[in-house]
Amino acid sequence: MMADWDAIILGAGAAGMMCAAVAGQRGRRVLLVDHADQPGKKILISGGGRCNFTNIDTAADRYLSANPHFAKSALGRYGAQDFIALVDSYGIAWHEKTLGQLFCDGSAKQIVAMLEEECAKGGVTMALGQPIADVAHGDGLYRVTVGGVEHRAPALVLATGGPSIPKMGATGFAYDVARQFGLSIIQPRPALVPFTLGADEALFQALSGVSADVIVRWNKVRFREAALFTHRGLSGPAMLQISSYWQHRTPIHVDFLPDHDADWLIEAKRERPRASLRKVVAQALTERLADALLERAGVQGEMGNLSDKALRQLGARLHDWSFAPTGTEGYAKAEVTVGGIATAGLSSRTMEASKVPGLYAIGEAVDVTGWLGGYNFQWAWASGWAAAQAV
């Protein structure tokens, strides 16, 4: 059995469905293949089931890549407003949460249904729930064997994502196919992922469930968002953001009091000399967090009995508290993958491999990783749209 197409797209996630829909509506005969039995599985669990589908502040400097300029072309030609217009055309209600993040009022299912409808408008054929047995190339055609049928097309699009969230069926399949055709891979690692802390910081496990508004810093990168203590370490948006940049065996620095100036404890001592240090710090931080930090810092007592020097040192430490993560919770808890198919071998305009005509890579499979907050979806839409113009 054989079947011929204009393009075969591997992976029916955000990027693959977008690419298939747009290419199909351009008159291309498209086959969309996925080993999962339904499309858009990662979309359905995103944003707590409400799908943070884009970010209105999208810009190339919000992405990590070996080539920081690579994302500019696609993002510039298909921006957040373009996807919002598509969502609006389906009457899907949405709201802005914080920091430019847009979510469905209802359910992520609406975004998947919209993409399915867009694929249907383009006459896209889906082959779901069957593993890809073989991918080969010869005589200018890519051959993909699915369920005993060999499909052929002059264009093959890799859109199977990265290895994050393996319980959803995610694998490094795209990397294997890319390597098969001689493309290089930037070493992948988990990103947007919680940190683990070691036994020497076990004190903080007692804070599981406590969150605080912080500035977290690693080298010159900083984010101000909520941090959350867990029974294994540190999570919350601030920690997920910095995890994408963090390198093993390096510390991260947390400012627990971003709205207080350096000498606030000395001023508090002048105003309330009889108050306990614990009470003053707890009013700024919550009792459980104050207790843990003061215990670790080894400072206690009435404000009036503490020297200005001791208070100044404590204030500095609360503004620049160092944690040494032992690692992260890995791909199981990572929202995305940093690294992937090297951009050096791809056209930033079409996503086509420069040395392998007809082979394209889009979405998370590529070495372009966005910040938390809808940026990775916007890259999926933009890179999928760009490839769809070319296949």
Image (cartoon, rainbow, N blue to C red):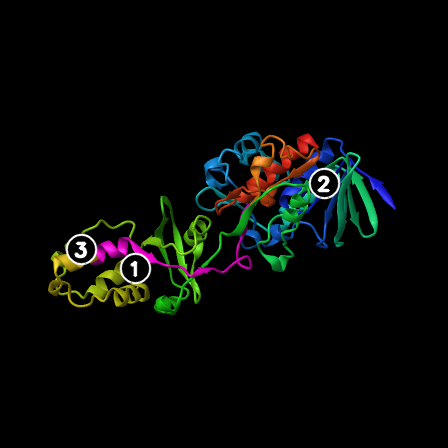
**Which residue position is annotated with label 1?**
285
Indicate which disc, 3 or 2, sits on the residue closer to the N terminus.
2
| Disc 2, SS | helix
Residue 323: in magenta span? yes
Magenta run includes residue 327:
yes
Where is residue 297, by image quadrant? bottom left
Element type at mark 3:
helix
Q: Nearer the viewer, residue 23 or 108?
A: 23
Instruction: Look at mark 3 in the image and give the residue it sits on.
Output: 312
Residue shown at 58% from the left, 56% from the top: 165
What whole-number distance in Å separates the C-alpha atoms at marks 2 and 1?
Answer: 50 Å
Measured from the top left, where is residue 318 in percent x and y? 27, 56
Q: Is residue 301 left or right of residue 285?
A: left
Pinpoint residue 176: horizontal percent, then vertical percent. 66, 49
Q: Which residues are magenta?
A: 314-339
Q: Residue at x 46, y 37 (%)?
A: 61
